[in-house]
Image (cartoon, rainbow, N blue to C red):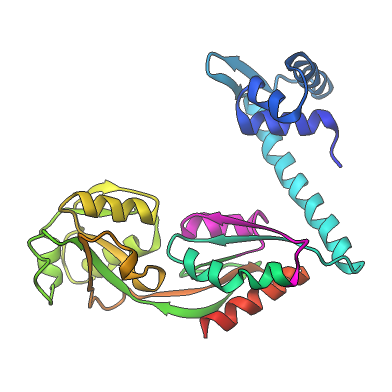
Amino acid sequence: MLSDDVDYFLSLAASGTFTRTAERLGISQPALSKAIQRLEKKMGVKLLIRTVRGVELTDAGRALHLRLQSVSRDIDNAMQEARDLGGNQAGLLRVGITPATTDFAIRALLPQLITERPAAHISFTTAFSAVLVDAVSRREVDFAVCPIPEHVAAPLEHELLYEDPVALMLNRTHPLAKRRKLPLEELVKYPWAGTRRHELTRSQMERVLSAQGLPRPRMVVEADTLNGLIMIVSQTQLLSMINTRGVRPEALPDNVIMRPAMIEGLDRQIGIVRRAGYASPIAERAQELIRVAAQ
């Protein structure tokens, strides 16, 4: 429902180049350039700058892009809500999942949801919990299945699904691999691989260590995907953490093992985080299926 020039601007901001944008939109590059020029003339400001790598948004362009993204999402949501209320419940569902909840959420929803609603469109966004909670706030996803944050502020709400125990992950050749009990004071002596500091499991671990007067583990490598951490452990002598419900041991590389962490305060609460208020029928049904799977 936005004008073509605005849609073209949004596509160009997303792709970063005139060539890719024109190809994706099915128009010529001169036509795309004229559309951007018309929009800039209408706005009275320069929205982007051409560079050797493509295009960069100006300060005005970034501000417009951010506001237009929000407007576009609101229009999509309003149209979908109208369809739902009018009886067309094919549905658009956008679900946020973390690397550790991916297996659980997909198994809970598929194939049941597409069997019930074959005309539906389902989109999964994978990120760590802080990013997903922000995406729920901005209405980029309908809800997220993720660790429940310590503080969930209105208009967000949450419900608990299950507890997710944490385990240590290490290479079979690691000096600690043959030990069954791994006290914290031993673990902090070795180098680690982990997520970035904002991710919940790492921040929880650092708080637990601090409470016991122990130093933070030395993070040699950081990765923002679960598969990345598993590969790092398989290739190095670095320790890491893994949530046991989200990973099947048989799916790990042969040289990667898990050991019970036995660290009080590290087990995570996994739940649904959503905005309060209206939820589409397909979003309601998806949450119902997830609740059943969690039991």
Task: Give left or right: position of 57 versus 231.
Answer: right
The answer to whether residue 276 of the structure is visible from this angle is: no
**Residue 293, located in which quarter of the rendered image?**
bottom right
Does the magenta-highlighted stretch encompass residue 261? no
| Image quadrant in which the N terminus is located | top right
Residue visible at 69% across and 35% down in the picture? 65
Percent position of residue 76, x then y: 79, 52
The answer to whether residue 108 of the structure is visible from this angle is: yes
Count numbered badges in the picture: 0
Which stretch appears magenta? 116-143
Task: Give left or right: position of 130 versus 43.
Answer: left
Residue lying at the far right in this picture: please name it: 86
Percent position of residue 216, x then y: 21, 58
Q: Is residue 31 above or below residue 227?
A: above
Does the magenta-highlighted stretch encompass residue 118? yes
Q: Is residue 72 above or below residue 250?
A: above
Q: Is residue 143 above or below residue 5?
A: below
Residue lying at the far bottom in this picture: please name it: 295
In front: 52, or 43? Answer: 52
Residue visible at 79% across and 32% down in the picture? 6
Percent position of residue 185, x then y: 11, 68
In front: 10, or 264? Answer: 10
In front: 148, or 225? Answer: 225
In front: 211, or 99? Answer: 99
Percent position of residue 131, x then y: 51, 54
Residue visible at 74% across and 50% down in the picture? 73
Q: Is residue 262 above or below residue 214?
A: below
